[in-house]
Amino acid sequence: MAHSSSGTGDGLVLGGDIGGTSTRLVVADGAGRVLTRGTGPGGNPVAHPATARQVLAETLARALDGVDPAAVRAGVIGMAGSGAARDPAARAAYDELWRQAGLGCRPKICSDLEVAYAAGTDAASGTVLVAGTGAVAGRIRDRRLVAAVGGHGWLLGDEGSGYWIGREAVRVALRVLEGTALDGVLARSVLDRFGIDARDAEARSALIATVHGRPPVALAAVAPLVSAAHEAGDPAATAVLDEAASHLLRTWDGLGVADPGAPVVLAGALATAGTHLGELVRAGLHDRGAAPVTAADPVLGAVRLALGSERSPVTREGN
């Protein structure tokens, strides 16, 4: 049976978070209770220009399964590379996508920084540092992004991101194969990940060819190997994570002096508390006089924004 509007609002809302690795959409009622979810692969139009809108359409169909789309009266979707969606031709294509889905609204596509920030705090203004597939920091004022540092994408930057960490891990393995660095847990795990058994010049060529044969953003999937190698005591892995933390902190520093008492929201898988990288970033922010908080699921931040109030209660299914 299809869900109908319920709770304190007049209808349903759509919330979404679209990144380089995954696309996630939820439908919530007027009280912020999540009713349905849809997930899909990366839909960032910068990282996946050929498939982004198709991925969104398919994920939206899954999110709307069992829901009356006409009852969806508001929507906010945070998107990495959201600037690409503001092009007139792209905007028209997205409008057609909403129309075909039968939505009762035209969802707002905004920066993923805005929904990440809303997922971490009720405060209207502050800063956010996202450390996921990409890396970017933003200043939020009245729940709108007013300044950003980083987030240039794999070709131009994203230092300290999952992509960057994965790339550095492959470079460690290449140095080992070239005889300019000592072998270790990280190099072996990278070579195993890419199915490279030999340790000779042919292995070097094979690793280069294999990595170049995949989308650059796929290197983000290698990042967990670095954390595991660090836990195993590999100094090369620790050095990569230490450098990543320095990059992330410099990205946040680029926003300028923080407003006293303003929240600093950390978002993205790499910023998780308890990891070496996450703790380094938190320690660095504390040294700068900040008190970072961790964002919840960014799609819940998108729901908050769609409901039109940061103070709207947002809960997971069953809560």
Image: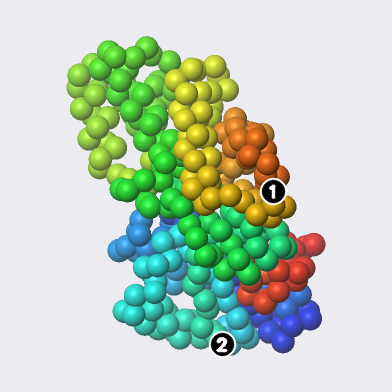
Residue 1 falls left or right of residue 25:
right
Q: Residues within 10 Å of mark 2 (few under 14, many from 20)?
A: some
From the viewer's side, name the closer residue of 43 and 202. Answer: 43
Q: Residues within 10 Å of mark 1 (few under 14, many from 20)?
A: some
Residue 221 falls left or right of residue 34:
left
Q: Is residue 200 above or below residue 279?
A: above
Quick one: SS at disc 2?
Answer: loop
Q: Is residue 304 above or below residue 190?
A: below
From the viewer's side, name the closer residue of 224 and 89. Answer: 89
Mark 2, residue position: 104
Residue 174 falls left or right of residue 106:
left
Mark 1, residue position: 293
At 37% from the left and 51% from the top, the residue drawn is: 153
At 50% from the left and 34% from the top, the residue drawn is: 246
Q: Quadrant of residue 3?
A: bottom right
Q: Is residue 273 visible?
A: no
Q: Quadrant of residue 67?
A: bottom right
At 37% from the left and 63% from the top, the residue drawn is: 45
Between marks 1 and 2, how big is the CA–CA gap?
35 Å
- The amino acid at mark 1 is Val
Q: Is residue 160 above or below residue 152?
A: above
> Where's residue 218, x and y in %?
38, 45
> Where's residue 305, x and y in %?
64, 71
Q: Is residue 8 visible?
A: yes
Colour mode of the rendering: rainbow
- The amino acid at mark 2 is Gly
Quadrant, the C terminus? bottom right
Quick one: SS at disc 1?
Answer: strand
Q: If you read the primary sequence from the N terminus, does the residue marked by circle 1 or circle 2 appear first?
A: 2
